Image (cartoon, rainbow, N blue to C red):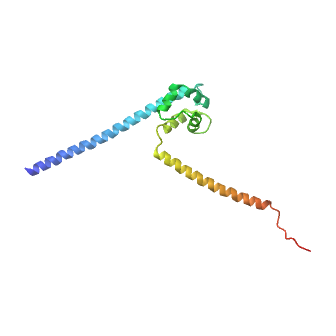
């Protein structure tokens, strides 16, 4: 009788564990679905905002259009609710203008705002640190090359050395 109860306990424990595992998978799936729905809603909201900002309906936003739109409290408040600062509109514009064309397209606006959304992630900070390090190394390398070229051209421009003879 004792072995029957041990096997029954093992079976109940197995069923319980299996149910818990299935529940965890379902919770994860639900969390993913919620995240995807939230992401989709944010993208749609950003698309709508872009259309509001694009006053001349050119499908491109200029710095002037962005400044004008951010002067409206409703729009600035929405952007701020995404944890994107609107205090320095010029810098915000430069960051979002990924192709450096001087205007912002719908795709640039949506992807730029989604990247800026929320606090900086450790990966983003690490990536910036790495890129900064690589840039500093390249600048140092270029500085050495420029110094070498300067020395080379200064030597070429010097008059040839002539030994003076005394009579």
How many numbered marks have been drawn onto this rendered protein structure? Answer: 0
Please give left or right for residue 149 compared with residue 130 in the image: right
**Residue 136 or residue 24, whichever sits in front:** 136
Outermost residue, left side: 1
Query: What residue is shown at x 67% (from left), y 57% (from top)?
Result: 145
**Position in image of residue 106 (x %, y %):** 54, 32
Query: What residue is shown at x 82% (from left), y 67% (from top)?
Result: 161
Please give left or right for residue 39 compared with residue 71 in the image: left
Q: Is residue 42 visible?
A: yes
On screen, residue 77 above or below 97: above
Q: Is residue 62 visible?
A: no
Q: Image quadrant of residue 19?
A: top left
**Position in image of residue 116 (x %, y %):** 50, 38
Outermost residue, bottom side: 167
On screen, residue 119 above or below 59: below
**Position in image of residue 142 (x %, y %):** 65, 55
On screen, residue 88 above or below 21: above
Please give left or right for residue 104 compared with residue 15 in the image: right
Query: What residue is shown at x 59% (from left), y 35% (from top)?
Result: 90
Outermost residue, right side: 167
If the image is split into quadrants, where does the C terminus sit? Answer: bottom right
**Position in image of residue 84 (x %, y %):** 50, 35
Query: What residue is shown at x 31% (from left), y 41% (from top)?
Result: 25
């Amino acid at each position: 009788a004792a072995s029957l109860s041990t096997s029954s306990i093992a079976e109940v424990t197995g069923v319980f564990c299996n149910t818990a595992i299935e529940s965890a998978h379902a919770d994860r799936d639900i969390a993913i679905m919620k995240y995807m729905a939230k992401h989709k809603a944010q993208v749609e909201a950003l698309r709508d905002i872009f259309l509001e900002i694009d006053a001349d309906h050119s499908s491109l936003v200029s710095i002037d259009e962005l400044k004008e739109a951010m002067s409206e409290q409703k729009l600035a408040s929405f952007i701020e609710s995404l944890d994107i600062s609107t205090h320095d509109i010029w810098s915000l514009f430069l960051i979002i203008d990924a192709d450096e064309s001087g205007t912002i397209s719908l795709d640039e606006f949506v992807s730029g705002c989604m990247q800026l959304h929320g606090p900086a992630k450790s990966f983003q900070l690490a990536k910036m640190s790495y890129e900064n390090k690589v840039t500093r190394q390249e600048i140092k390398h270029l500085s050495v090359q420029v110094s070498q070229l300067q020395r080379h051209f200064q030597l070429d421009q010097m008059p040839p050395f002539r030994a003076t003879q005394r009579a």
